[in-house]
Image (cartoon, helix red, strand yellow):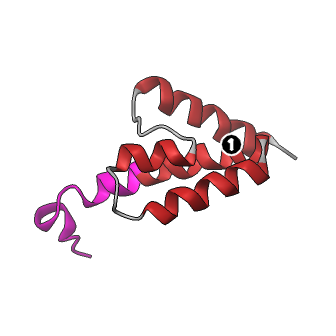
Amino acid sequence: MDIIHIFGTPFYFIEYAIAQVAALQLYKKYKQNPEQTLTRFKKALALGSSKPIKEVYEEAGIEFNVSKENIREVMTLIRAEIAMP
């Protein structure tokens, strides 16, 4: 199977990874406070592309951050979820 994205649009896969980190941050927030998280997420979605992505993430209550520390935090969440009975 050929994957032309790597050559035609090389940042395509990176966007998937960034979106996955954001989704997991939202999931963590949702587990802590579902109602507030949904409210903030809807406000962020309403911004559409009217604001820079960093501001959209902030509106949702998450960070546009793919640092080692943030990835570690997300991985801790994933490990805990997998370990749940």
Q: Secondary structure at mark 1?
A: helix
Q: Nearer the viewer, residue 51 or 32?
A: 51
Q: Does 11 lie within the magenta span? A: yes
Q: Would you name the residue on which mark 1 appears? A: 29
Which image quadrant for residue 32? top right
- In the displayed structure, 69 sits above or below 53; it is above
Pick the residue in front: 78 or 2: 78
Residue 74 relative to residue 1: left or right:
right
The quarter of the displayed image where residue 54 is located = top left
Residue count near mark 1 (Cα–Cα under 10 Å), binned few <14, some 14–19, many ≥20: some
- Disc tally is 1
State yes or no: residue 8 in magenta.
yes
x 30%, y 51%: residue: 14
Find the residue positioned furthest to the right.
85
User: Residue 64: where, in percent of width, then height?
Assistant: 41, 40
Q: Name the residue located 49 percent from the left edge and 33 percent from the top edge.
A: 71
- Could you tell me residue 33's position as x and y percent? 78, 44
Q: Is residue 69 left or right of residue 49?
A: right
Q: Is residue 4 above or below residue 56?
A: below
Relative to 54, 38 lies left or right: right
Identify the residue at the far left of this view: 7
Q: Position of residue 70 (x, y in %)?
A: 49, 29
Amino acid found under the numbered disc labelled 1: Lys
Which residue is situated farthest in the top direction here?
69
Q: From the image, give the main secondary structure of the stretch colored magenta.
A: helix
The residue at the point 48 percent across, 23 percent down is 69
* Range shown magenta: 1-18
Q: Quadrant of the N terminus?
A: bottom left
Name the foreground residue: 70 vs 38. Answer: 38
